[in-house]
Amino acid sequence: MSYQSWRNLPKVAGFLSAAATSMITPAYAELLATPEAITLAGTRSSTVSTTLTLSGETDAITLEPAVSDLRRADGAASIAAADVVIEPDSTVSVPADAPTQVKLTIDLSQASANGEFTGALYLYHEAGRQVIPLTVRVKAAPIWPWILMFAGVALGSWLSFYRDEGRIRDEILLAVSRFQNRVEADPELGNASEAGRAFRTSMDNTLKRVVLAVEDKDLGGDNNFDVAHSRLTDVSDLWDRWINFREDWIAQFRYAQQLAATLQEIQGETDAKTIFMQGLQDHLDAVYRKLRTGQYETPQFLSEEFIAIRQQISFYRIAEKSVDDLKKQSQDLADDAVRRAWSDKLNSLMTQLDNSEPNQDSQDIWQERFNSMQAELEAEIEAYQKAQASEGKSIFSNLRGRSGGVDSLSVEQIPLVPSISSGTVTPERGKQANRNLFWFNQTSRGIAIIGLAWIGMIELYTGKPTFGADPMRDYFALLAWGFGAEVTRESVVKATQSLGVTLGNQKDS
């Protein structure tokens, strides 16, 4: 640096000092302002105010207050100076022996946006002015933050509910609808005969039980979806049985029609429902009941049932024909009284058959009596007519070896045993229990959600004086917190349930 430059340094320093003095207004030494900086905060719907206390040190001071516009840091929003009310709005006298207060009131609803606004309060006096920094923080009114918070909670609750229950329910109901469409689309299923309708009924009833398990979810506990899935598996098994052996099922169903028609024909001939025929009808009805409950795995089992019924019908037909043959043989007797006596004996034999159960024991007893009467009749015919020898062979020997069970000779028809209810809980108690569980679960859920939402409002809204200045970030944060509140609640419930701790939404099993 040259010697000339060194000589000019004092002049430059003096110039800079003068410029700085002209830019900075010094505080008036005899005026004290409390607080030295003013900060106000509130919501857009509120009005805020504060009091500035002024005091003089030695002499009385006369002031002219004024305020500047308050602007946000980005310059995109402001609060006009006209919206800041100063009381008193004229000359303020500050005596030396007592403080004076100046009140500032700002209607924040006049702010053009949320955020932090800065400006200054000017106190002009004879020696210059004193500047009091003024900061106003404006945030959104709580109504919309609460709405967004609960909207997030509702969204999280709905997704949580749908994921845990709604999705499973819809999948089950969709599967039920598909099975129903398949059943309806098959022309042979349910239209072939009563047996076919019984087979279809087993599918329809199982599908109804699936739907009932879904509808009774709140009453039966969380395992009801497992029950519904299990019953849906039963429907799938029934459908597989039908598809795998469709033609065989149809053949058996049509044969069931023939058996039913044959029974109806025999009953029409006898003009009365005998115990024997009623037993066969009961056997056929039992087959229908098993079909309605899906108890036959394959058509082979159904065929075995029909074979047993057919054998019983064949036994009855042969027995009836054999008794008629004996009646014809009894006509060879010479004495009318003896013929009438034998007619009564043979009618009694047929009555015994009608009054017996269609089983092996009853048939053996009846066969033995038939053989005895046959031998007696043949001997009597031989004694009276001494002409025609018997065939030497029982015409009824082919009736042996039939299936059967009980050994009663004359069984009266007994009414069906009334069904016994397995439950002891009255409908009103069940409804009350349902209501109690519902309100307990909803109250527990509500308390948990409100608590988490309240914490979210404290963290994201109450603790942020300029909430809403960045709407996209602030409001989305509330929505995300609300959504996460429900997810957090559900996670805590599942974690505690896995440890065996019972919470509100866990139903008693």
Image (tube, rainbow, N blue to C red):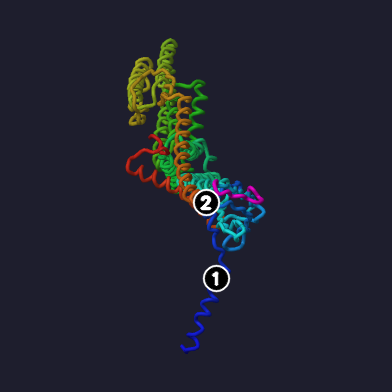
Count of numbered labels shown in the rendering: 2
Frontmost residue, 89 versus 477:
89
Horizontal side of residue 103 vs 222, given as left or right: right
Q: Is residue 500 above or below residue 159?
A: above
Q: Which residue is mark 2?
A: 34
Frontmost residue, 189 versus 145:
145
Which amino acid does the dot numbered 2 rest on? Answer: Thr
Frontmost residue, 418 versus 265:
418
Which amino acid does the dot numbered 1 rest on? Answer: Ala
Mark 1–mark 2 Cα distance, whole angstroms, equals 26 Å
Residue at the (54%, 50%) spot, across then down = 55
Q: Secondary structure at mark 2?
A: strand
Let me know if residue 93 is in the magenta part: yes
- Name the magenta segment's main secondary structure: loop
Frontmost residue, 211 versus 467:
467
Is any atom of residue 466 visible in this view? no
Q: Secondary structure at mark 1?
A: helix
Q: Which residue is mark 1?
A: 20
Let me know if residue 371 is in the magenta part: no
**Residue 429, percent from left and from top:** 45, 25
As drawn, the residue found furthest toward the top would be 337
Horizontal side of residue 360 vs 274, given as left or right: left
Q: Which mark is residue 273?
A: none
Location of residue 187 by image quarter? top right
Residue at the (50%, 25%) spot, across then down = 267
Horizontal side of residue 406 vs 186, given as left or right: left
Residue at the (42%, 30%) spot, across then down = 283
**Residue 379, percent from left and from top:** 34, 18
Q: Which residues are magenta?
A: 87-98
Q: Earlier in the sequence, mark 1 or mark 2?
A: 1
